Amino acid sequence: MLEINQIYKTFNPGTINEKHALNGASLTLEEGEFVTIIGGNGAGKSTMLNAVAGVWPVDSGVISIGGENVTGLEEHKRAKYLGRVFQDPMTGTAATMEIQENMALAARRGKSRGLRWGITKSEKEKYHEMLKILELGLEDRMTAKVGLLSGGQRQALTLLMATIQKPKLLLLDEHTAALDPKTAAKVLEISDRIISEYNLTAMMVTHNMRDAIEHGNRLVMMNEGKVILNIAGEEKKKLTIEQLLHKFEEVSGTEFANDNAILS
């Protein structure tokens, strides 16, 4: 479903601020896989996710989604393949519009629209059932303005909107980092449920080592712009933070420097 083959990205080349963010990063995701990506600050994890999303062009290498080469596609053209949830809960929704209106916008994205704007009875019934999945009571508040929701509620709604059209690939960009621990745990639980129920292929960047271990069926660790560890199956299920740190040190020859990731 996703193939990243030897991608490179340098920011500010030829200047004093030159930064080699990706150095031959490669990763393949099969359909239905849920991969968590962890790494220290500057490891390249968010840069790789943004490269997949088309936020900026890569210098070289190939990115394919669903067997189609999207390397040269602009971000807005690539969006039809992707669902994305950002770190900031305010980013993925329109605050002045109702919950049901936000969902209607997401459901109609990329489709031809007439002059009439209205949500049909059948659409309302569909959104009502979908909102029940969140177990937040939002199905009974469909006419409420999204700006009245808490950060966790908005992030859960954004997750639902990002998956309403069953994207080929769901990108979760540190989507719980701005939430308190209890709310973050709830949003992660909802993420697991939606990904499993819809059999989505997903890629979650996180700064939290425990979350990277506990969620998804594969764990990828990055360092200096490339993938250095790829752990799946029984090995991932039994993995501890201590074992992961040891593996990182073995492969990289250095200590993992991000205390927040370890202590979260």
Image: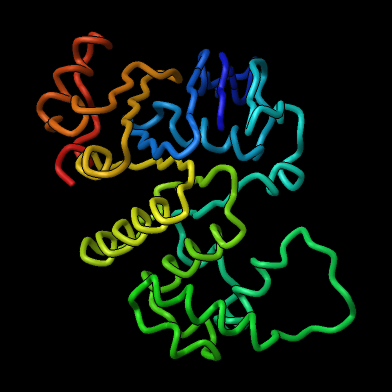
Residue 198 lies, with reference to residue 153, above or below; the image says: above
Say which quarter of the image contains residue 112: bottom right
Give the left or right position of residue 167, taking residue 137 as reference.
right
Relative image position of residue 79 (x, y in whole percent) = 68, 48
Residue 84 lies, with reference to residue 180, above or below; the image says: above
Relative image position of residue 78 (x, y in whole percent) = 71, 42
Residue 144 lies, with reference to residue 35, above or below; the image says: below
Residue 177 seen in this snapshot: no
Give the left or right position of residue 250, taking residue 227 as reference.
left
Kindly identify the residue that appears in the image at 24 percent across and 33 percent down: 258
Relative image position of residue 262 (x, y in whole percent) = 17, 37
Kindly identify the residue that appears in the image at 22 percent across and 43 percent down: 214
Give the left or right position of residue 87, taking residue 163 as reference.
left
Relative image position of residue 193 (x, y in whole percent) = 35, 58
Residue farthest along the right direction in this orientation: 115
- Comparing 56 with 154, the one in front is 154
Q: Quadrant of the N terminus?
A: top right
- Comparing 205 with 178, the one in front is 205
Kindly identify the residue that appears in the image at 34 percent across and 42 percent down: 206
Kindly identify the residue that appears in the image at 51 percent across and 47 percent down: 170
- What coloring was used for the rendering? rainbow
Say which quarter of the image contains residue 136: bottom left
Say which quarter of the image contains residue 249: top left
How many numbered discs? 0
